[in-house]
Image: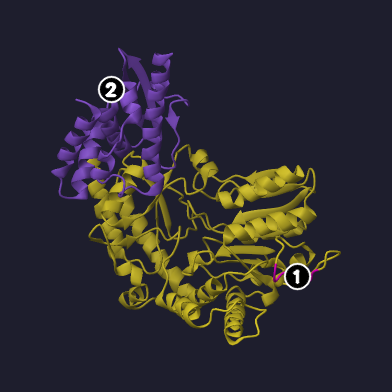
Amino acid sequence: MIQNIKKIREDFPILSQTAYGKPLVYFDNAATTQKPSTVLDIMDEYYKNYNGNIHRGVHFMSDKATAGFEKARKTVQKFINASSDREIIFTSGTTGSINLVASSFGEKFVGEGDEIIVSEMEHHSNIVPWQLLCERKKAVLKVIPFNLKGELEYDKIPSLISEKTKLISVTHISNALGTVNDIRQIIGLAHKNNIPVLIDGAQAIQHLKVDVQELDCDFYAFSGHKIYGPTGTGVLYGKESWLEKMPPYQGGGEMIRKVSFKKTTFNDLPFKFEAGTPNYIGAIGMGAAIEYVQNLGIENIAEAENELLNYGTKKLSEFEEIVFYGTAEKKASVISFLFNNLNPYDVGTILDKLGIAVRTGTHCTEPLMEKFNITGTVRASFAFYNTKEEIDKLIEGLVKVKKLFG
Amino acid sequence: MNIEEKQIEIIEEFSAFDDWMDKYEYLIDLGKELPAIAPELKTEENLIEGCQSKVWVDAELKDGKVYFTADSDAIITKGIISLLIKVLSSQPPKDIYEADLFFVKQIGLDQHLSPTRSNGLLSMIKQMKMYALAYQTKMNG
């Protein structure tokens, strides 16, 4: 259990500020999370004292930065229980990770007439890279539908799988609806047919325990900035057996063993996929963020967020004017809704002026919005550092919205 | 009144509001009062695509002046459109095309709308000026 919320909020300096003279209520955590001081301090420390380009340097600062970067890789490995740190590739974020697989795996294993399966609730980042691949290779993209509660229709998956299916890529948790998908079922079904599975963990890694060996997923992608780390950082976990077989993604420094104009040979994992100077101080920050989460306990975080979700859902349900989108049995702390028949922009603009940050619009899931036949929603997404008092402010804000728009 | 005088009038109206809520309350009222556009004018051609809300703008030329009608699926956006119509409608095309819309900044709409939203505002203005330019060219031709 999370005991002292006041003390925890002090770990996040940004939360104590005001917006338009009102105390900030930050409910846009599904878009990005705030950073604890430990993350800000360690990045500051490295930039001030140990900024040397990693791996190739012979000097003091390069050694320190390299050690910090590789320690962060170990931290990630332990956090998701990967069997080796060779399976942890640092990327620019979830989008970067998915593009890596779409490009590199796609290059080698996907050909004309082959099929890739995604779901109807994917973020554009888990749709467009596959569309581009399908265009390049004349392959076909197939889609797992979801029902009106926002749950995947698992019984439809077997009929989508064929001998041509090369990969299934689905989200662990929906960013727009909050649905926690039963990825074990999908992975089991895929593996029975020898199909690898990529899990988009952008919305899951910060909310629940992820054990890639226990899940047995082939790839798992997530972003540092959604788990209280810096922007521009991310991870691709891949089973070593797949990563070994995949060709390099981008060419450049660090990813090579030897370069000549006749033939270039490539470095070992994970460096084969990390061309150019990586965001090493960012990765060190992400490592510190994960350590913060581990100290707090991901189970405690899940419990606190679940309480906020239940409280928020209950309080919002008291409005007659509310329509929820995403009412799955298993949900993360994301509430998507329409209010008083208003355009989400109207609701969000007024809440903003009251100091309450929510997200409005399609949440980069246009196919999902199309399914519900709406142009967007208001989305409030909670993190463990949010409070019930803040939810009460959201409720007061909506009362004000109702009064203003009539 | 010409475009400049109309802008000054709006700036004076807004100077009476002390806080943001009052400004938005006023915009909401304007939005509600804005006459709905005829359904047949809500065409793809008249639509300005924005991430946050949809806006339709139509224009016609009568006796050498341009008259705008517009609509949106968001009320605050309609309020902003209403201000633009107040300033630009029933003016000669050349004046519209050349107008410096200083009131947007003066009443604080530019700095308090996020980039995507203010792009929406900018594309509305751009669209209205395009209509004016088209009519200007037609009149000269």
Residue topped by disc 2: B91
Residue topped by disc 1: A256
* Local crowd size for mark 1, using a 10 Å CA cut-off: few (<14), some (14–19), many (≥20): some
Q: Which tint is chain B?
A: purple
Chain coloured yellow: which letter?
A: A
Q: Secondary structure at mark 1?
A: strand
Which residue is drawn at the image coordinates 39% and 39% (left, top)? B120
Cα gap from disc 2 to disc 1, whole angstroms: 66 Å
Q: Height in image: B16 above or below A229?
A: above
Nearer-the-camera pick, A69 or A287: A69
Which residue is drawn at the image coordinates 49% and 83% (left, top)? A49
| Chain of the residue on which disc 2 is drawn | B
* Local crowd size for mark 2, using a 10 Å CA cut-off: few (<14), some (14–19), many (≥20): many
Which residue is drawn at the image coordinates 79% and 56% (left, top)? A108
Q: Secondary structure at mark 2?
A: loop
- Relative placement, left or right, of A172 versus A379 is right
Give yes or no for residue A374 being in the magenta stretch.
no
